[in-house]
Amino acid sequence: MFEDSKSFYKLMEKIMNKKDLSSLKRILIQKETELLNKTDNTSRDVDISSNENVGDEVDVASQNIEKEIYFELAANDKITLSAINDALTKIEKGTYGCCECCNDAIQIKRLTAIPWTRYCIKCQEEAENQKR
Ligand SMILES: [Zn+2]
């Protein structure tokens, strides 16, 4: 399962230490929860209070709620959420911290500011320049 973990940490150590990585991971999970709770507190409460006798339908209902949470998120939050998911996957795979565009290491400063960023500052700036 963790065959690649040695080479992974070798690569990661160039950018950050294990402590940095685990604190970044914690921030990612925190942010993910925060985004999911955004809709949680608004629409879900209304749904549940208006339908108290759910009984056997609970499982189905909770599945639907998950879909709805995602659906009700603002577009920006969806983008952030999927970037967070990708970042967490990348941590598992050991490819976290690499720019998706040039495959270079993303600066630790940048990762600390936006842990779910996909690109290094150079590629991000180039992309933004192209938009103008
Ligand atoms: Zn890059």
Image (cartoon, rainbow, N blue to C red):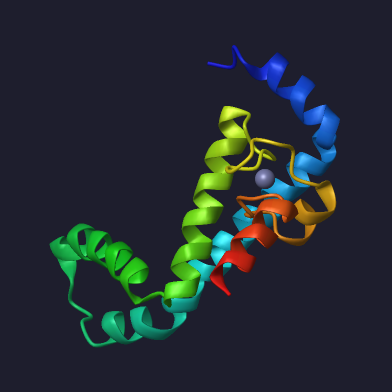
Of residue 1 and residue 61, the one placed in the foreground of this image is 1
83 relative to 109 in the view: left or right: left
Give residue 72's quadrant in the image.
bottom left
Of residue 119 and residue 117, the one placed in the foreground of this image is 119
Q: Where residue 29 appears, x then y in whole percent?
A: 61, 54
Q: Is residue 50 above or below residue 130?
A: below
Of residue 96 and residue 2, the one placed in the foreground of this image is 96
Give residue 88's quadrant in the image.
top right
91 relative to 112 in the view: left or right: left
Quarter of the picture containing the C terminus is bottom right
Q: Where residue 42 appears, x then y in whole percent?
A: 42, 85
129 relative to 38 in the view: left or right: right
Q: Where residue 12 appears, x then y in whole percent?
A: 77, 30
Seen at 44% across and 66% down, the residue is 78
Q: Is residue 32 above or below residue 39?
A: above
Seen at 73% across and 53% down, the residue is 122
- Ligand 1 is in which quadrant of the figure? top right
Q: Is residue 5 above or below residue 44?
A: above
Seen at 60% across and 50% down, the residue is 118
